[in-house]
Each structure stands twice: as C-alpha cells, then as structure tokens.
Amino acid sequence: MALLQNAGVLLEKELRAELRSRELVTTTVVFILMVVVLFSFTFDPTSVESRRFGPGMLWLAFLFAASLMLQPCFLREQVNDTLSALRLSVGDPFAILLAKVCANTLFLLLTELLLLPIFAVLYNVAIRDILPSLALVFFAGSVGVCVTGTAISAISAQARMRELLLPLLLLPLLTPVLIASTEATAALLAEDHVLRWDWLGFLLAFDVIFLTALWLFGEYLLEE
C-alpha cells in the first residue's frame, strides 16, 4: 500500500512538471505528425496499401517518438541530485520507477490519442467501430515500450554517451513489441476487423515479465 501511495505522489510530481513545461508531449506530437504527414504523400492513402503499410509506419513513429520522450526521463533528476533525495524519501525504490513508467505511458497514450484521428483522415481508415479494441492494443504496446524504455533510461542516465546509448539499447529490445503491436493493429484495420488475441496476449505477457523484472532489479538500476 505504501508503494502505491509513494508512486502516486511521484506520479503527481511528474504530471505537474510536464503541465508546467509541456515539452515532452508537444515535441512528441510534432514529431509523429511530421512522420504521418510525410508518409501520406509517399503512397495513395485511398488504396489498399494504406492498410498494409499504415500500422507499421504508425508504430515506428510511436517508437522513435517514445525514444525522444524517454531520453530526459532521469536527466531531470540529476539537477541538485534530486534522484538521491527521492530515494531517501521513499521506502521502496520501485516506487520511483513505477511513477516514471506510469507518467511515460500516460504521455505516450495522450500523444497517440491526439494523432490517431489525423492518421485516420490522412490514410482514409475507419476507426470508429474498432476504437475499443484499438485502444487496448495501443495500451498494451505503450506499456511495453515505456517499461523497457524507463529501465534503459535509468541505465543510460549516468553514461557518458547517453544520447546514443538509449536508442542503441532500446530499439533491439522493443523489436518484439513493435512486431506484435503492428500485427495486432494491422488485423484491426483490415476489412474484417479481427482482434488478434495471440498478439495481444504476447504484448500483455511482455508487459508483465518486464514489469516484474523492473520490480526485482529496480534498486540496482537506480544505483547504476
């Protein structure tokens, strides 16, 4: 119970910091918007190719945008050695990581929510009937991206070449999430609108496994 209370307080701190600066969500939205618009001019958005290549392009944009969002995740805590103060203020260091994961997931989901209607219009894809299933896939994929990205961000925050280390470690680890999310999204955007429970189950299993690993080894990540 104390873990959730501490994580809730730290999550509120993360949300307030973002509301004051509005840097992460704004930068991410602009980046994904540029990618979506530029790719819409590459092929005919009214053709069947939109359903084939649209999901992969969309999740690639989400993945690279998440890497931009996750980069300053722990860098802000280095000012005045804030991370050490946070570790002293909570009993379980996992509360810090859990708050970071929740905040990053909320920011990424907000970005996806803002960009999804634009994607649907530019690529002539109907999403109204599949919106609940699509939201479930987006949530499972976003949690996987943010759990892994938060762990890598904690590792790379102390590194000398942190700007290069984060995407170098993050992209190979998230390849399974990218494949599963793309396949599940493509099945929903197809004409028959099928929810692939095998890919969704893979995403949920990935989330549980990596979240458990983050709980077990979170203290060592913060020490490094």
Image (cartoon, rainbow, N blue to C red):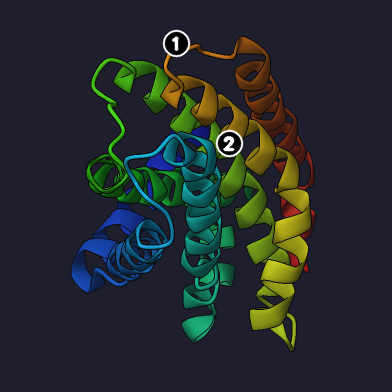
x 59%, y 60%: residue: 87
Number of residues whose C-alpha sits closer than 10 Å to that of mark 1, classed few (under 14), some (14–19) or many (20 or more):
few
Q: Residue at x 27, y 67 (%)?
A: 26
Let me know if residue 218 appears in the view.
Answer: yes
- Gap in Å between the C-alphas at discs 2 and 1? 16 Å
Residue that label 2 marks: 182
- In front: 144, or 214? 144
Residue 50: image quadrant is top left
**16 up-or-down from 120: above or below:** below
On the rendered structure, is 164 left or right of 104?
A: right
> Residue 141: x percent and y percent?
55, 36
The kind of residue tagged 2 is: Thr
State which mark lies toward you, 2 or 1.
1
Query: Is residue 222 visible to us here?
Result: no
Query: 161 or 172: nearer the eye?
Result: 172
Residue 192: numbered disc: 1
Q: Residue furthest bottom?
A: 160
Along the polypeptide, which appears first: circle 2 or circle 1? Answer: 2
Q: Is residue 214 above or below residue 77?
A: above
For label 2, the crowd category at 10 Å Cα-Cα, with few meaning under 14, some 14 to 19 and many 20 or more, is many
Residue drawn at (64%, 81%) of the image: 163
Give amino acid for label 1. Asp
- Residue 69 horizontal/vertical position (percent): 46, 64
Query: Residue 128 placed where, x, y %?
Result: 23, 21
Q: Are marks 2 and 1 in contact (CB under 8 Å)?
A: no
Instruction: Indicate the quadrant containing the C terminus: top left, top right, bottom left or bottom right.
Output: bottom right
Q: Is residue 168 above or below residue 132?
A: below
